[in-house]
Image (spheres, rainbow, N blue to C red):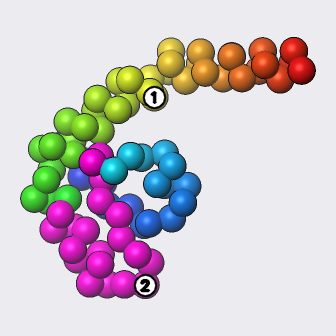
Amino acid sequence: MNDLVLTNIEILNTIIPKGCATFFQLDDIMDLVGAIQEAYDNREAFGNNLYSYYKENLTGDIMGSKYLNLYKRIVNQ
């Protein structure tokens, strides 16, 4: 599994839950270093968590179903 080290911006925090990646503050090199170390130290757990999250929320079938339901709600309003 690949480790995810992401900037701590709202949209990424919304998409990727904690426990699947590490986040660091922009313009803070030491925070980035810590996030890289945390990702490395927890790579197996984060990889497993991210894979589970993907399988439960982000497959093509699941995303297609969510979009279809959204479109149906919009059309029916």
Please name the residue shown 68% across and 16% down the image.
68
Nearest to N terminus: mark 2 or mark 1: 2
Q: Is residue 68 left or right of residue 14?
A: right
Q: Quadrant of residue 63?
A: top right
Q: Give percent across and percent down for residue 62.
A: 50, 18
Q: Secondary structure at mark 2?
A: loop
Q: Residue 62, relative to residue 16: is it above or below?
A: above
Q: Give percent across and percent down for residue 33.
A: 23, 77
Asked if the stretch drawn in magenta spans residue 22, the answer is yes
The residue labelled by disc 1 is: 58
Q: Secondary structure at mark 1?
A: loop
Please name the residue shown 44% across and 27% down the image.
57
The residue labelled by disc 2 is: 27
Please name the residue shown 38% across and 46% down the image.
17
Q: Is residue 32 left or right of residue 70?
A: left
Mark 1 crowd level (few <14, some 14–19, many ≥20, 10 Å Cα): some
Q: Which residues are magenta?
A: 19-38
Mark 2 crowd level (few <14, some 14–19, many ≥20, 10 Å Cα): few
Q: Amino acid at mark 2?
A: Asp
Q: Are marks 2 and 1 in contact (CB under 8 Å)?
A: no
- On residue 42, the disc is none
Q: Please state, as top left, top right, bottom left or bottom right, where the C terminus lies in the image.
A: top right
Asked if the stretch drawn in magenta spans residue 40, the answer is no
Rounded to the nearest whole Å, what is the CA distance between mark 2 and mark 1? 30 Å
Q: Give percent across and percent down for residue 10.
A: 54, 60
In the image, farthest residue toward the front: 77
Q: Amino acid at mark 1?
A: Leu
Q: Please state, as top left, top right, bottom left or bottom right, where the N terminus lies in the image.
A: top left
